[in-house]
Amino acid sequence: MKEKDSTSHFTKDGLMYNSIPDEQNEETWFSSPKRVLFLLKDQNQNGEEKWDEDIREWLINTASDTTESHQRTKEANRNLKPRFFRNIAYLLWGLSKADHDNPWWYDEVTKHFCEVKEFFNTQPFAMVECKKQPGGGRLAPKDLKRHLCDFDDLLKREIEILSPTMIVCANHHIYSFVLEMYPHEELFSIEGHKEVSYHQPSGTLIFCSYHPSDRKSSPKIYEGVMDHYRAFLKYQSINK
């Protein structure tokens, strides 16, 4: 997905590589009834100097990891040391495991940390940046909206190829963008839970979430999605 501006650097993303062989990982993804996509803003790279990066490799060691620092960073990612990955792992677990009889509250998830970590490193999930040009710690809303507008066809195509059944949108601009991918009359929302929409023809749930790196507490980030998912599960159970 090429940018239309002057940058020469590009972020690759999509289905995350993990400890499972790539072909098996992809097969498991497309055969799974729950395919979770985290739709983020842009790749945060420290400093003025930017570089090409494949975020799909954030959990695995590769030949390009030429320094001990690279290897330590990826080991920390796999062990959920960064808060960013811990928040994603908790949400991946909750959305994958919760059902009408098992609500998976935040405190319950943290008590199963080792299982969550194992799941995170073996369960297929996808991460996609809406802005493919690497950036810094903050992305102005106007710049995000510009990229969502200028490259909407390419981003929509990427999402269509991944074919997720759950899309966790990292802010309300991204949420609005995804909702526009579907005919309005085919979207369903539950009263009091406007941060989740359901596209019944494709079986896709779309969530409006805090960003995984947001300063808000991890319980708030987790429950900010799971509260709406539990409401959907309850509605689904009542209206079988």
Image (cartoon, rainbow, N blue to C red):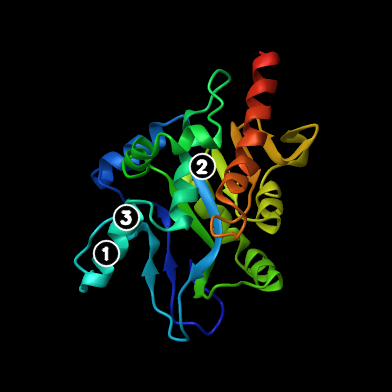
Neighbor class of circle 3 (other Cα within 10 Å; few <14, some 14-19, many 20+) is: many
Residues tagged 3 and 2 counted as in contact (Cβ below 8 A): no
Of the numbered discs 2 and 1, the one sitting upstream in the chain is 1
Q: CA distance from mark 2 to mark 1?
A: 24 Å
Q: Position of residue 111 (x, y in %)?
A: 43, 35
User: Does residue 51 appear in this view?
Assistant: yes
Viewer-nearest of discs 2 and 1: 1
Q: Amino acid at mark 2?
A: Leu
Give the residue displayed 40% in from the left and 34% down from the top: 112
Q: Which residue is mark 2?
A: 91
Nearer-the-camera pick, 61 or 183: 61
Mark 2 residue element: helix
Q: Amino acid at mark 1?
A: Arg
Mark 3 residue element: loop
Give the residue displayed 60% in from the left and 36% down from the top: 226
Q: Amino acid at mark 3?
A: Leu
Identify whether 189 is placed above or below 45: above
Q: Which numbered tag is attached to residue 59?
A: 3
Q: Which residue is mark 1?
A: 72
Quadrant for residue 74, please give it: bottom left
Quadrant for residue 172, please give it: bottom right
Q: Position of residue 4 (x, y in %)?
A: 56, 77
